Image (cartoon, rainbow, N blue to C red):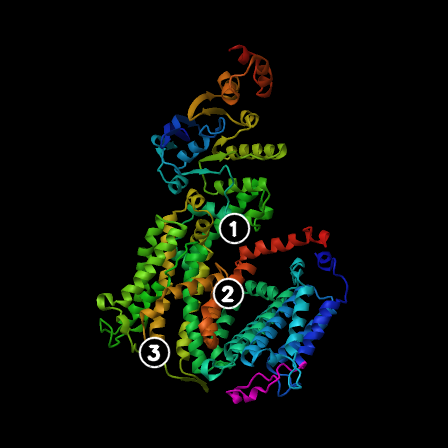
Amino acid sequence: MSEVSTAGRTGLFRPLSTAGAVATVLGALLPWATFVFNEGPYPAKATLQFFDAPFALSGFRLHLMLFGLAALVVGFTRLPGRGRVLRALGWGVLAVSAVNTVFLISNGGGFGAVSASDGAFAFGCYVGLAGGALLVADNWHASAEPLPRWKFSLPLWAAWLVLLVSFGAVLLLVAATLTAGGLGGAADPYAGPVFLSFLGAAGGLLGGLHGTGLLSWIGELSEKHRLFSVLVLLLCALGLPLTSAGNEYWMTVAANIGVYAATAIGLNIVVGLAGLLDLGYVAFMGIGAFVAANLSGAAASALGIHVPFLLAAVIAAVIAGIFGVIVGSPTLRVRGDYLAIVTLAFGEIFRRAAQNNIGGLTGGANAIPNIPQVELFGLEFNNPVTIGGLQLPGGVLYYFLIVLLVALTMVAFGNLKNSRIGRAWIAIREDEDVARAMGIRTGKAKILAFLTGATLAGLAGAVFAHKTATVSYESFQFLESVTLLAAVILGGMGTIPGAVLGAALLFVLPEKLREFSDYRLLLFGLALVLIMRFRPQGLVPDRHRRAELVAEDVELPAAPKEATA
Amino acid sequence: MSSAPALQAREVSMVFGGLRALNNVSLELAKGQIVGLIGPNGAGKTTFFNCLTGLYTPTSGQVLLGGTQLPGDPAEVTTAGLARTFQNIRLFPSMTVLENVLIGRHVRMKQGPLSSLLHGPAFQRGERAARERARELLDFVGLSRVEDELSRNLPYGDQRRLEIARALATDPSVLLLDEPTAGMNPQETEAARQLIFRIRDTGISVVVIEHDTKFIFTLCDRVTVLVQGELLVEGTPEEVRGDPRVVEAYLGKPPEEVQAVVEEITHGSAEGASGE
């Protein structure tokens, strides 16, 4: 293994990488724009210090500086996986530089903003871009290096400590990502670029750590201490209100992400495990939401009865599940494309029915407004709470509820996947005829997949109804189904972290990038195309798909690429 | 034990549109026997297998396993104790070797949806037992070392053996092997023969489709020859090998000078040739 990593590129000194690292550091120090940003429309929000303090290092320039220094140091060491680290840092530098360059050019008055004019020189962005490009280009074939594997084992307390620290770091990273760039929209026109810039830096950092083998090692460690990891992860999730994201606004955003993450995990059962393409999935969430709304005692609801939340949620889940069976039944007859069309039609039927207030249950265009907040154990869920001496913001109880919901769906997904039923689903996805020949009742199994997915979506819908207080057919459009599907595919089919990450990305990005809202779908599409091209297995691939990847990685050095070079 | 044959097909016919793929084919397999099914390409061997395992519903005829009639659904047939492999290997490519065998265990496991959701103690017991049995079978076919490998990454011969292990995991009383040695070298073929003998020794009856007549004649207790959907000859390897109709079916009616060569190839005896 080690001879592979050092073969060909043994030299300690890598001129191109070093040049890239130096350029990155220089880029961070150079001025980036020829104008003073404080004269912009929101002087108080001038978080991007481009010109007024040319040599002050903060924000994205600090990130670039650190990346440059890291690349410089790593370039002169024999760190295993060095190429991977350098390449990831390069991508990070490239992303940060590109985001800020595009922003300066588009918002700062064209190329004049990023070049020499009026006696002011500003090509920090060009130098940064060049640095990133050099780092990436010089390590383009780093995938040929095997991913370093850390072999040493730790005593129990040390392992737990490592896991605690790692998950704590994840919590801080999540909080920082959520709050990066502030509220966005009219409140802060710079929010989008700041957020994207932060995302680029975080991606580069994580990629670099992955390149050293650290993340895989922590992954293995957490696999080994699974129960402990799950508990810590749950604690970390519950700890989000204590971080910088601990105000009502971010709690609402996080709760919304959670609802869609839970729904995406449900969809992941249908699409990721059983391989049944469902294009109308959000309808099940809608059914759950409308059932809960009608049982909430809201003035506009048709039934006008008030059922306690927990019971209402269970009823919503059951009814959504029944619809799941109804929609799933045609899957016995149709496969592949035809199934997709059947589910698409179901989604449309649901939306049209809800729009036209069929049965008087959906409120039609008026929706069902003023759904009362959840009350459990004497707690009103919209209010801030004080636990001990801790002041927690409003909406935090919904956030806790949704964390529990996501945890519940995760357990359901994980348990089902590693069982007789889950294996049967995967077998059906792989080869339905053979699955039948192996004794699997494929019809039953497929309906069960639809039933489970729909039940989970219905549960999420019930929480969604109370959380948003208004349930309208507009929340359950075809686009939402597609976005959920995109979340599953983007994150990685058949995995839990994949679905959560995908849902988080797809529902945070619009929140953050409001100034691009006209181009939102365009950007989504572009991102999906790029991911399908360069990382078809998704951001967090399934163990099996990862195994395929490892196999490919091992094969690469043997390829005749060296011979032609 | 009961006198009912392990597997009995009675006058099975299969018609696709205007094409009569099988015409009143019967087959009987005693307990612990290995029966070979040979015939030229397109003779209907795999179609016959598909009729036995419920992938096709025969136009007419009956299939009995241990004296009871088999239902016409592949899943039910497997549950009843008839397992098969496929001519063109059909593993679950993105599942590991062990998981492939566990799929075979599916019909013998009891866990329902609720138990799978909750992972209670009974679930854990069942899961452990299934894994243990799957590992035993991998050991039996000689694939223990690669249990965590993706099945698609296995070499060709190992994929064939994995298919056999997966079929055995369903605890069959009768195993149908569709060309188990296709594409194998002589050593692998010999290993396959030993494996089939060992399977037979565990009390499972075996039906083998194969083109390699030498392999069939040295492996099987009885041989059935299918030609154009019809049963041509049935008997012991010696009887079948000596039957001129078999040679004719494979090669057409040969001219005198070729016939001698043909006999050598098919190991035909002098009496068989002179009988014509």
Say whether marks 1 and 3 touch (CB < 8 Å): no
**Predominant secondary structure in magenta?**
loop
Q: Amino acid at mark 2?
A: Leu
Can you give x and y, in whole percent of width and height, for residue B204 in the image? 47, 34
Residue A212 in sight: no
Nearer-the-camera pick, B118 or B272: B272
Can you give x and y, in whole percent of width and height, for residue B269 in the image? 57, 15
Can you give x and y, in whole percent of width and height, for residue A66 in the image? 66, 77
From the image, tell me which residue sits under label 3: A377
Residue A31 included in the magenta stretch of the image: yes
Q: Which mark is residue A526?
A: 2
Q: Earlier in the sequence, mark 2 or mark 3?
A: 3
The chain ID associated with circle 1 is: B
Q: CA distance from mark 2 to mark 3?
A: 47 Å
Q: Which corner quadrant of the image does residue A107 belong to?
A: bottom right
Range shown magenta: A29-50
The chain ID associated with circle 3 is: A
Nearer-the-camera pick, B243 or A368: A368
Helix, strand or loop at disc 3?
A: loop
Q: CA distance from mark 2 to mark 1?
A: 31 Å
Q: Amino acid at mark 1?
A: Met
Say whether marks 2 and 3 touch (CB < 8 Å): no
From the image, tell me which residue sits under label 1: B95
